Amino acid sequence: MVVEGWLDRAARTRPGRTAVQTPGKSWSYAELLAAARRGADELTARGVRPSQSVAIALPGGLAFAQALHACLLLGAVAVPVDPRSPPAERARIAGGAAFLLDEPLGVGEVSVEAGGGAEGGRGREAVEHDLDATAVVIHTSGTTASPRPVELTYGNLLWSALGSAVAMGLDPEERWLCALPVCHVGGLSILMRSAVYATTAVVHERFQTEQVLRALREQQITLVSLVATTLARLLDAGLRNPPALRCALTGGGPVPAALLERARAAGVPVSLTYGLTQSSSQVTSTPVAAIAEGRASAGPPLFCTRVLISAEDEIFVQGPTVAPAELAADGWLHTGDLGSLDDDGRLTVLGRKSETIVSGGENVAPAEVEAVLEAHPGVLEAAVTGRPDDHWGEQVTAIVVPRPAHDLQSEELRKHCERMLAPYKVPRLIMLAHEPLARTPSGKLLRSELR
């Protein structure tokens, strides 16, 4: 199936609407289309052809948006690369691309007609998207193994945008704040969905607490994508009752119930979400209409997405958002995550299957223990891992970062866990750390670096 190009349609229907806003500058949809057309001409002049891949090693901002949409206009495959990643990893991710773009494309004088059309070297030919064609290659976040490429089609991205709109609702004046890395699916999907909706993506190059706090207070942000650690930082910095915010979409891993209660008390509406690269981001999300219920689950599946819990408690996903190459022989995406569904079809995520600790023959999900530890008022963040043990097989071990000015003791934390967990889940060793835990740019714990 072929559909009208998203950026062309947005520029035709809402030419003056702000497409991308950064702390320094904004472009309307007419201006973004003109810049993307010039960028597509430049890529063509450099020898890039449709279906070839272009590695984009640029930070989130106007230059990245121009390069991304230039690829989509040309029919090339965009491969976002984190410009801050180590040179060896950056080279490995970009190595399979036909072309590496690590400097902004030329913009020149963007000329926009009074009627809203955007002029540029590519003229006025209509751009269409084949929903079966690959649009982008996104690399997984690499929390437990090396990042690997996932090919997402135009259809995957379009269905993800439609499913998200059904769950979140769609305000024609939407202003979705992205302070996540655009090289990963959580950040990139905001740019893609905004183009489909013809709404505004407010893009920050990286998460900076004061900058995000100011935007939420002063810039009429209606949606924001966060992870548990960034939500906690905003609440610590004094976020209360953001005036226009409909929803803080929070995922990237388990969100402690205590953090949800803090957000609720501060007047911050939180929708828990579960997603992964292979499903174009969201799989389940708490609908906006259900946020007030305050249930600590990741919500029901998105529109036209199916979730199944296997006999081994693994989360399986099926639907038009799933990358075709990621489906197993049984027609399902085997996520490698553990979870459960309640009677109303709401998903609770228990952690990674590969991270399960087997202690004395019992299975322990690190995320469950971390949530209990982080419910303690003196704990800023916690990580749980299994360490080899001659007697138990694995020993449940916790690394805990105290909140500033809290004098935590390991025995105090152990007793806290004993009140809330089965005995075999209580950490046998609790170590206190005073440096932030190692995380990916998208906020996920790097368990391979835990010591």
Image (spheres, grey):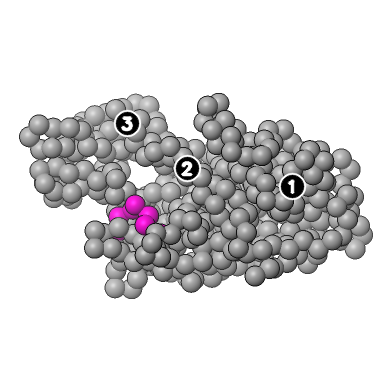
102 sits left or right of 34 in the view: left
Relative to residue 410, is residue 5 drawn left or right?
right
Q: Residues within 10 Å of mark 2 (few under 14, many from 20)?
A: few
Amino acid found under the numbered disc labelled 1: Arg
**What residue did someone put label 1 on?**
49
Q: Residues within 10 Å of mark 3 (few under 14, many from 20)?
A: some
Quadrant for residue 349, please give it. Answer: bottom left
Q: Position of residue 206 (x, y in %)?
A: 57, 38
> Which image quarter is the C terminus in?
top left
Instruction: Give above or below for 246 relative to 449.
Output: below
Q: Is residue 43 above or below residue 193?
A: above
Per the rendered image, the range of residues in magenta is 333-339
Mark 2: amino acid: Arg
Which residue is drawn at the image coordinates 48% and 51% (left, top)? 277
Looking at the image, can residue 161 be seen? no
Foreground tag (3 vs 2): 2
Given residues 272 and 77, the one toward you in this image is 77
